[in-house]
């Protein structure tokens, strides 16, 4: 029996599944947010012999025979104390090796599944000038970022955590409470930390009041984790999530029951399904009222806007709209349907929206006030 235990690391920037085996033979599956666990399991199952072979190679390497391997040879050769340690991320679909240096200067080699380690080491050696330059660029960026905003979670006597943002252009200090209830202190570059702590202490009354105001929003804008006890906004109502043994997502009072076996990706799939259901219902209602018909209606994963209507009247709605109240969803539906006859945001366009939803400004304001919802899941 082959051991195919693995951990899944999901990212919304990832487009396809790739497998990574570290030097201890541990398997990590990098996957897009929405790839179902079952699909991942199937990929791992298909690749199990290659995984086993790669693990074997790792084990042999660990056992000693490392001298002739370019990875170590390179290390002794480094100039200016430059490190050439790297991480290999293999993918079955990749044809050529490719290097990337992250913001911390760490080097990753993206390689085809079958490329031998020795070949990878050669490749790294050949590209060492590029690597060095890329690392220098990363270091310069790090320095710049550190100068721009020195982040610190300083506690004053009252224990108010805050974030400091320094700017060369700023002349006076300013306190800002963001909608997540996080206090931000924007200060000139040269203001000492002690002075900032004093300022926060002085403004305690204002901070308390601002925090209280932000509280309901802070709860609403918690990152969606689907963990038991966490919160989830669904059709404008805030639910507490519970994770019992269940077969499907259910709503009961203020509780959203999410089956224990669901991962966050499964939960997102469920949310997307609800988005399809709710949005197609609302589109049917309003296309009949407005006597327009879009060429197609699809879901989108965009975070920049809630809906879009193309010149050919293909409409897309962001699935995250399922967090919004129905009356707000309706506004987005009417907005995009109005674009079928009016391709801009001119007077006629808004008149068309207002003819269906006279109070559209209030609904639009809700979206503006709750823009952060786009970023929490
Ligand atoms: Zn528009």
Image: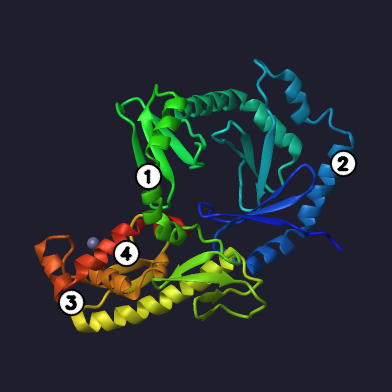
Report which quarter residue 68 is drawn in.
Answer: top right
- Residue pictured at 69% horizontal, 66% vertical: 42
Q: Residue furthest right?
A: 63
Answer with mark 2 or mark 3, whichever residue precedes in sequence.
Answer: 2
Q: Residues within 10 Å of mark 3 (few under 14, many from 20)?
A: some
Relative to residue 104, is residue 377 drawn left or right? left
Answer with mark 3 or mark 4, whichever residue precedes in sequence.
Answer: 4
Nearer to us in this view, 99 or 372: 372
Query: Do residues under tags 2 and 4 come within 8 Å of each other at their CB atoms?
Result: no
Q: Position of residue 268 (x, y in %)?
A: 52, 67
Mark 4 Cβ inside 8 Å of ligand 1: yes
- Mark linked to residue 307: 4
Question: Closer to us: mark 1 or mark 3?
Answer: 1
Q: Position of residue 115 (x, y in %)?
A: 71, 43
Question: Closer to us: mark 2 or mark 4?
Answer: 4
Can residue 40 be seen?
Answer: yes
- Mark linked to residue 205: 1
Measure how far apart labels 2 and 3 are at the Cα level: 71 Å
């Amino acid at each position: 029996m082959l051991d195919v235990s693995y951990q899944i690391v999901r990212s919304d920037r990832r487009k396809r599944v790739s497998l990574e085996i570290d030097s201890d033979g541990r398997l990590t599956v990098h996957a897009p947010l929405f790839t179902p666990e079952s699909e991942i399991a199937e990929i791992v199952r298909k690749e199990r012999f290659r995984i086993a072979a790669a693990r074997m190679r790792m084990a042999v390497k660990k056992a000693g025979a490392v001298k002739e391997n370019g990875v170590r040879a390179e290390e002794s050769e480094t100039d200016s104390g430059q490190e050439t340690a790297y991480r290999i991320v293999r993918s079955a679909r990749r044809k050529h090796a490719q290097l990337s240096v992250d913001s911390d200067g760490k080097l990753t080699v993206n390689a085809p599944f079958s490329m031998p380690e020795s070949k990878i080491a050669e490749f790294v050696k050949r590209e060492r000038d590029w690597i060095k330059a890329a690392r220098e660029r990363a270091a310069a960026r790090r320095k710049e970022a550190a100068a721009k905003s020195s982040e610190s979670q300083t506690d004053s006597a009252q224990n108010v955590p805050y974030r400091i943002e320094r700017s060369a252009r700023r002349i006076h200090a300013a306190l800002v409470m963001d909608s997540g209830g996080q206090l931000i202190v924007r200060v000139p570059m040269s203001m000492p930390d002690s002075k900032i702590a004093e300022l926060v202490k002085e403004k305690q009354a204002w901070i308390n009041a601002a925090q209280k105001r932000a509280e309901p929003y802070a709860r609403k804008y918690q990152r969606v984790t689907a963990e038991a006890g966490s919160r989830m906004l669904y059709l404008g109502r805030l639910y507490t999530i519970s994770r019992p043994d269940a077969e499907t997502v259910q709503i009961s009072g203020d509780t959203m029951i999410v089956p224990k076996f669901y991962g966050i990706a499964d939960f997102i799939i469920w949310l997307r399904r609800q988005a399809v259901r709710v949005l197609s219902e609302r589109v049917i209602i309003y296309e009949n009222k407005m006597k327009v018909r879009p060429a197609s209606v699809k879901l989108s994963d965009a975070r920049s806007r809630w809906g879009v209507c193309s010149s050919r009247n293909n409409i897309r709605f962001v699935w995250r709209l399922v967090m919004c109240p129905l009356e707000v969803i309706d506004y987005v539906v009417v907005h995009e349907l109005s674009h079928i006859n009016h391709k801009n945001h001119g007077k006629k366009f808004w008149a068309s929206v207002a003819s269906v939803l006279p109070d559209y400004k209030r609904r639009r304001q809700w979206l503006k006030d709750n823009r952060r919802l786009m970023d929490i899941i």
